[in-house]
Image (cartoon, rainbow, N blue to C red):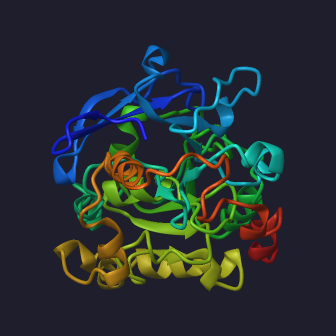
Amino acid sequence: MRSQGSATHPHVVLLYWSPWFDLVNPFEFPAISCANNISVTVTHNRSQIREAAALIFHVRGFNPQDLPPRSTDQKWILDTQEAPVHDAAFMEDFATMRQFDYSMSYHTGADFFHPLWLYDNYTQLVLQRSPVPFEQKAGLVFFLASNCNSYSDREAYIEELMKYVEVHSYGSCLHNMGGKTIEEDRTIREMSKYKFYLAFENANCDDYVSEKLANAFRAGVVPVVAGPADYSSFIPNNSSVINARDFPSAKELALYLHRVGSSKMLYDKYLRYKTGHGFTETFEDMWKRRGELAVFCEMGEELLASRNPSQHQAGTAVLPSLNQCEEEGFMRKLANM
């Protein structure tokens, strides 16, 4: 394994070989300080390939015509941040997948867990409160999305929900605010003026939880979620969110939102965790000591410990796959229209 530094202060270089979505170089960290005196450099600079202990390839930027020669002392890591319904052909191609030694994804079972949001202290982020008092909220339900053709068909569910409860939709999807839009840097501020936020994912897959959930916590509102069947790794406790799966129809969910939204006592029950108490053990174990750049430190530790030559095979951990997802149009069926 290629490493720099000394035996007592090892240094590991990680090279992103491919772009990350449409971003050319989002990860440039010259010296991340990790435990055990390890430091890690993350770079997109290909001139550092000789020093790199591992190359990272993002699914969306992977180009089979633009690959460096393999070296037995240099690992290849596959990074995927999208639900497998969007990258199924790639993920199920054995010839392609066997090139990688490790997986890096939003899935908690990946070799390297890399959530869809990067915050330095998620356990503190969830404690943020809305600056707008319950009695002064501008509206009941907030929604914001640009993908209007989701695999889950969340649009059909929300359209049905809108028949029974007022939902203010500011994005291009199901927009009903008379052309009024929200600048990205004002999203959290506007969201905090509401009581609930529809944190509905574009696909219902195991562990696929996007920044929508984190944004609801940042805004201090109650998230209404529709994503994986199990949110336990991502929420403070079971009383911190309202899950659309718990209701027989969109109409029943709407009636419940009316009920909770009209009672400060009922509403505040969903915010009790913001005192800093009531976190589940699962949630604390996952996030308490997990900083924004933890995944890169974990890579450095693993690469230093695993000194066997690369076997050109995927890691032993879980890779996102279609069998971890609900069928297409799941939310339309859940709406029970």
Side of 287 relative to 212 (left or right) = left
* Image mark count: 0
Which residue is drawn at the image coordinates 57% and 26% (left, top)? 19
- In this rendering, does residue 69 appear at all? yes
Rendered location of residue 289, percent (x, y)? 24, 63
Side of 101 relative to 298 (left or right) = right
- In this rendering, does residue 93 appear at all? no
Res. 217 image quadrant: bottom left
Rendered location of residue 73, percent (x, y)? 51, 38
Which residue is drawn at the image coordinates 74% and 51% (left, top)? 150
- Comparing 21 with 112, the one in front is 112
- Comparing 9 with 110, the one in front is 9
Side of 81 relative to 86 (left or right) = left
Side of 297 relative to 108 (left or right) = left
Which residue is drawn at the image coordinates 75% and 73% (left, top)? 335
Direction top: furthest residue: 47
Rendered location of residue 229, percent (x, y)? 62, 77
Which residue is drawn at the image coordinates 29% and 74% (left, top)? 284
- Comparing 1 with 115, the one in front is 1
The C terminus - image quarter: bottom right
The N terminus - image quarter: top left
